[in-house]
Image (cartoon, rainbow, N blue to C red):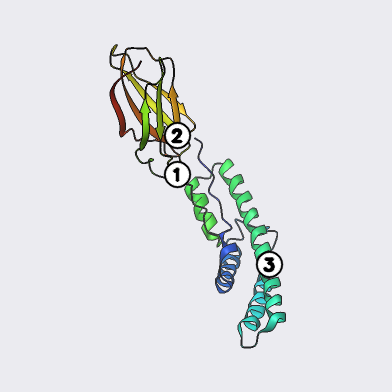
Amino acid sequence: MALRFPKANTWFQNLTNTDLLVYGQAVHDGLLAAIADFPTPPVLPAALQITINNYAAALSLASGPGAGKINTAAMNAAKLILKDQLRQDCLYVNMIIVGLISGGTSYEDAEVLILSSGYQLSKEPVPAGPMPAVELVTYGSYNKGQFYILAIKIVNSKGYVVRVFDITTSAEPFEVSFPSTRMTLMNLISGHEYTFQIAAIGANPTRNFGTQITNVFVI
């Protein structure tokens, strides 16, 4: 799987009112200091500072005693403007980073540049750990050449896989995947003894085949 480009993220949209003010000022100071690397953001540092100052003033009025609906509405309006300008400059920073990496800048250096702009790095998605062992409700060979398995659904699983061992012939095991907890293995050899191992399929490629059905005869 290809590596993802490092990116500045827009998590600031979820900050509290006061924290947004602090974050906005950090982005302004970062972009101003790194103007050689990010020379033409859509909202230049000087304009961004005006927006930050307006938001700070509106926030102060809305936070004081007897703020009232008018001051609160003014603060919310100023906050929307600040968030919009931070988003614009964030997209610009990411566009510059893509160009730099395409030109040979390392991922590590690109991450340093993003942080120098005052923005935070987006985190790489990390797959969850291996799925837990599958718990079975029932199983058995009820039709000729078939074996049925019913399992308890595992949250976040993408499906289930059964590893089949033909004990009678000692053939190489094979695997069959199923989208749901109801699994019917077909085309088995009647009268043969089988062992089955079951695992849930998740984002993590590691399979937990801790659940086994051993030494069963298929009718």
Name the residue nearer the viewer: 121 or 209.
209
Give the labeled residue for mark 3: 80
Q: Residue 4 got which mark?
A: none
Percent position (x, y) of residue 109? Answer: 49, 50
Q: Is residue 155 visible?
A: yes
Give the labeled residue for mark 1: 155
Name the residue nearer the viewer: 48 or 72.
72
Percent position (x, y) of residue 137? Answer: 37, 35
Which badge, 3 or 2, comes first in the chain's sequence? 3
**Which tag is nearer the camera, tag 1 or tag 2?**
2
Q: Residue 181 got which mark?
A: 2
Crowd rating for badge 1 (residues with CA inside 10 Å; few <14, some 14–19, many 20+): few
Q: Is residue 7 left or right of residue 151?
A: right
The mark total stands at 3
How far separated are the C-alphas under marks 3 and 2?
47 Å
Which badge, 1 or 3, comes first in the chain's sequence? 3
Q: Is residue 30 visible?
A: no
Residue type beneath disc 3: Leu
- Against 102, residue 186 (above or below) is above
Residue type beneath disc 2: Thr
Residue type beneath disc 1: Val
